[in-house]
Amino acid sequence: MDDIYSRAKEYAFKLLTFRPRTKKEIEDKLAGKNYPAEIIRQIVQMLENYNLVNDEEFAELWIRDRCKVRSYGRWRIKHELALKGIDRALIDEQVNRLISDEEEFEMARRLVEKKRKTGRLNKRKVYAFLRRRGFPREIVNHLLAEYGWEEAENPCE
């Protein structure tokens, strides 16, 4: 049993050398290698005790990266974190703490400006692009109006 524990621990450490991971990601990866549930629980507990797995810190890093590097809106960030196994309450708390309404609006505006500079400012495409990036309809419609397009329930009309 010690050999299994050692191999599982080594694998978990290897996973953490590539990038930070959530508790669920570690559990899923270890389960995918068919390690026993009790070993997985022990490994995850050990990693949490040494602060090598910390869902709160992971969420903060993820949000900062997705805002600064990729310019994603709240919805997309929340969705990605949920897929990674982060608790919904923690997601909401971190997103609301780290992204203000004004910041989200400015991120969307910068994306529209970038599209405008490349000459690809088409109402339908901009609407779909911003929605895929996770921006709420209110922000998207406000920006469409700002650029001379009327708000629409269905921008594809």
Image: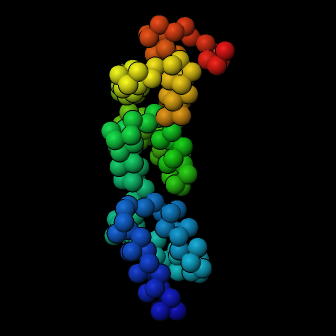
Which quarter of the figure has residue 108? Answer: top left
Q: Nearer the viewer, residue 27 or 129?
A: 129
**Where residue 27 sits in the image (x, y, percent)?**
53, 68
* Residue 112 visible: no
Q: Nearer the viewer, residue 121 or 84?
A: 121
Which residue is pictured at 46% across the width and 60% down the height? 22
Q: Is residue 57 left or right of residue 25?
A: left
Which residue is pictured at 38% across the width and 61% down the height? 20
Which quarter of the figure has residue 17? Answer: bottom left
Which residue is pictured at 46% across the width and 85% down the height? 7
- What sort of colour scheme is used for the picture? rainbow
Is 25 rendered above or below residue 43?
Answer: above
Q: In which quadrant of the rendered image does the C terminus lie?
A: top right
Is 44 rendered above or below residue 126?
Answer: below
The tally of labels here is 0
**Where residue 79 sits in the image (x, y, percent)?**
54, 43
Is 26 rendered above or below residue 37?
Answer: above
Q: Nearer the viewer, residue 52 or 126?
A: 126
* Residue 107 visible: yes
Please identify the residue farthest to the front as the structure is shown. Answer: 119
Which residue is pictured at 64% across the width and 19% down the height? 156
**Where residue 125 sits in the image (x, y, percent)?**
54, 25
